[in-house]
Image (spheres, grey):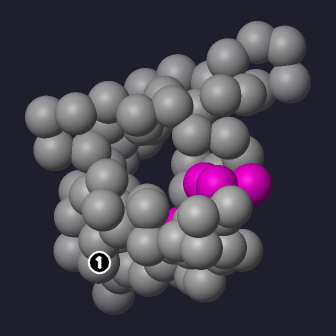
Amino acid sequence: MTHAVPPITLDALKVGATATVVHVSAGEAADDGVSLSRRLMELGFVPGEKIRMLKRGMPGGEPLAIKVGNATFALRRFEAALVSIQPE
């Protein structure tokens, strides 16, 4: 019997680990009225997409370098906290 790993948020993923996006939570609207969650989804953080944590910046662990498909993005921790993932 295998135990499924419970979903976590992207900001908690360890460096080198891979995961699948489960959900993107609603974020605050930016100055132009577009929500942060919509921007994340436009970048490729959509349910079912595979991602990989490449690196955490120093000091403080920001920004986070995340690989989505063939692209790499730098996210702040509060942005990454909006993305629910299923670690592999």
The answer to whether any part of residue 54 appears in the image is yes
Q: Is residue 2 above or below residue 77?
A: below
Left or right of residue 72: residue 8? right
Residue located farthest toward the front when viewing the structure as drawn? 32
**Left or right of 24 on screen, residue 67:** left
* Residue farthest to the left, as pictured: 70
Residue 74 forms part of the magenta stretch: no
The quarter of the picture where residue 49 lies is bottom left
x 76%, y 12%: residue = 58
Please state, as top left, top right, bottom left or bottom right, where the N terminus lies in the image. Answer: bottom left
Residue drawn 65% across and 28% down?
Answer: 63
Give the image location of residue 36, x and y in percent: 57, 66
| Residue drawn 84% across the image and 14% down it | 59
Q: Residue 52: where, in percent of width, then height? A: 35, 41
x 30%, y 62%: residue: 42
For the residue labelled by badge 1, is the local secondary structure a helix, a strand or a loop?
loop
Relative to residue 11, is residue 48 depicted above or below?
below
Crowd tier of the residue under label 1, counting other residues whose Cα lies within 10 Å: few below 14, some 14–19, many 20 or above: some
Q: Is residue 56 left or right of residue 66?
A: right
Can residue 85 be seen by looking at this rendering?
Answer: no
> What segment is highlighted magenta in the picture?
78-83
* Residue 70 position in % (x across, y down): 13, 34
46 lies above or below 88: below
Query: Which corner quadrant of the image does residue 73 belong to?
Result: top left
In the depicted view, which residue is nearer to us: 71 or 12? 71
Residue beneath disc 1: 47
Q: Nearer the viewer, residue 41 or 59?
A: 41
Question: Mark 1 is on which residue type?
Answer: Pro
Q: Which residue is at the far right?
A: 60
Q: Position of residue 26 (x, y in %)?
A: 60, 83
